[in-house]
Image: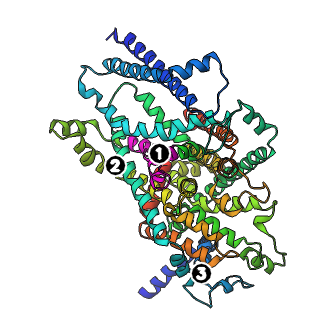
Amino acid sequence: MDKALRAEQRRRHLRNYLPHLPGDIIKILAMLIFVFPFYWMLITAFKTYKESIIVPPTLLPYSFTVDAFITVITKLNWFTYARNTIVVTLSVIVLQLLVMVPASYAFSKFRFYGQGLFFGVVLVAFMIPTQITFITTYMTMADWKLLKTLWPQIIPFGANAFGIFLLRQSFKQIPDEIVESAKLDSASELQIMTRILLPMSKSAMITIALFSFVGHWNSYFWPLVMSITEEVRPLTIAIEKLKEIEYGLQWPQIMAGNVLLVLPVVIIYIFASKKIIQAFAYRGMK
Amino acid sequence: MANKKPIRICANVLLTISVLLIGYGFLGVRINQTNAPVPSSAFIDLTKRIGVPMIIAGVVLLVTAIVLGNTTIQRRTHLSDYFPYLLIIPAIAFLMVFVVYPMLDVIYLSLFNGTVLTPTKRWLGTSNFEALFTVRRDFQVALKNTAVYTVSMVVGLIALSLIFAIWLQKDRKINSVAQTVFFTPHLVASISCAFIFQWIMSGESYGLFNTVLRLFGVPKVDWLNNANTAMGCIIFMNLWKNIGYYTLIIMSALKSIPTEIYEAAELDNASTLRTFFKITLPLLSPQIFFLLITITTGSFKVFDSINIMTGGGPGDATEVLARYIYKYAFKLNKLGVASAAGVVLMVILVLITLIDFKGLEKKVHYQ
């Protein structure tokens, strides 16, 4: 009796699921299309050059080797480039935080004359891309004799207009009474920012930090212009230079370089995909 | 209370004058730094001479305006009223030096002929712009390519993200996995995506695309070196890279639509298609508008994928505005032409953003 009931239940589940089946198969195929390019990058990196240009290409490398990785890491100053990328990305995030939090605090919790004008500057910055500002900024950096340092990749991004915009919005949603009562308890302005406003704006902060991290870790155009010497190159430019070494395109090496660039981001994504997706959705709703 | 309005108007006038004076003063300083003489006229000579004093006067006026204006806002004036200015000074300083000044300077540089080392070699006036729209065919090609790319991205991304979002709407395990997967390329460096697709679309017979096509008996195509296919490949790659992000935005908007509305539509026996066009689409209009603006401005700036995959080639087939500016500034050493193209790009982007602000006020449906 019990058995029959359970069998009946299972049959009903299956019957309910069946209409989903064709759609799900298409979904899995679509997912494969999205994943496959990354798979192709990964296995090419483990092939020998000889195998990489074989016809037809092999779906699994028979000459499984890590030579391409070793070549990329030893032949290039990989650690220098990686250090540059890490230093630039972290410095930008820290600098932006230091500049953005006070500005957002002023724009959200104070009334002062000229507020509209100054916020207008932020809005203008919001629509002017680096593809326009790079010419003059390059010359400014040359004037300041900073072109051989990492500074040109850091200080131009000191004020994050998008961040100020988003954080101001988030601070505004915090009731003024909370700030007022903290002031009555003789909290300093610094304490108000770090102990009250920031903890209450977590999702905005995560979104901003994440956008900055992804943007600067992956950034290509700006360092292409600003890194004129070998010592200040970030990973992205180093990988592009892989095209120029030796004769012919060494695809296993290029792919190995890209694997090393992509890996940290993908690892973070695997562990925090829900949080990251939420953060990006948050950006879209504002 | 009543006598505050004239003070405020007075402060506003002072503020406007101070901004104009500071701008004018900096123009004078900039002309003095110019390598080549700007054609002399009474106006230019005067500007050159009084640059620095004008900046000082402007700053004094600015401070006066702020002090005056603040008396109309605060109940009692206090030194702590000036605290917020202290808070915004770092941000405003960074923005002035690295955004506002470069933006205005690009306009100034577009009036000259020069290189990065000597940016203002020779005064040209507006002839850089005339050249862009008459003689320089390559600029018109770049402009046309940018337009083709932008329209394809806008239409493709909006249509696909709507389809994907509705398709993955239901709360099921497979849908959330699919969403995670589709979003991945958005986080990956555009140069890595470009390299992967350059490899997949390789023109040799060991290229993956050509291998698959050979299975169907299609002869090999040199995808990225063929003027007919190159732009299509770039668009395909960027659709693949960005679709996940826009699907995410549409999807979170879909989830915020109350289910009662759909239940009511069902009671009225409305067809699926009718429900989509009469309910879903209008309720999504703020997000679709957001997509329209973000994709348009983003597409006008496209650079990374094109510089890696085709380098603007073959010929000029995939040359776009952003790469055109970069190429003329740093490869061809024609800074004036690059700056003029930069001004064109700037005008386009500003226009789109203004439409954005206007559109958000009016047409879009809000719940």
The structure residue drawn at horizontal position 44% and vertical position 56%, both measured from the top left corner, is A279
**Vertical position of residue B147 compared to residue B251: above or below:** above
- Nearer-the-camera pick, B164 or B28: B28
Q: Is residue A244 visible?
A: yes
Q: Residue A134: say if magenta.
A: no
Where is residue B36 shown, x and y percent of the image? 64, 32
The structure residue drawn at horizontal position 40% and vertical position 26%, both measured from the top left corner, is A114
SS of the residue at dot 3?
helix
Part of the protein shown in magenta: A140-169
Kindly indicate the quadrant of the structure image that contains residue B218.
bottom right
Using the image, name the chain to which the residue with label 1 belongs.
A
Amino acid carrying mark 1 in the image: Trp
Q: Could you tell which of marks 1 and 3 lies nearer the N-terminus?
A: 3
> Could you say which disc has been placed on residue A144 in the image?
1
Kindly indicate the quadrant of the structure image that contains residue A241.
bottom right
SS of the residue at dot 1?
loop
Q: State the residue position of label 2.
A: A201
Using the image, name the chain to which the residue with label 3 belongs.
A
Amino acid carrying mark 3 in the image: Ile
SS of the residue at dot 2?
helix
Q: Could you tell which of marks 2 and 3 lies nearer the N-terminus?
A: 3
> Could you say which disc has been placed on residue A43 in the image?
3
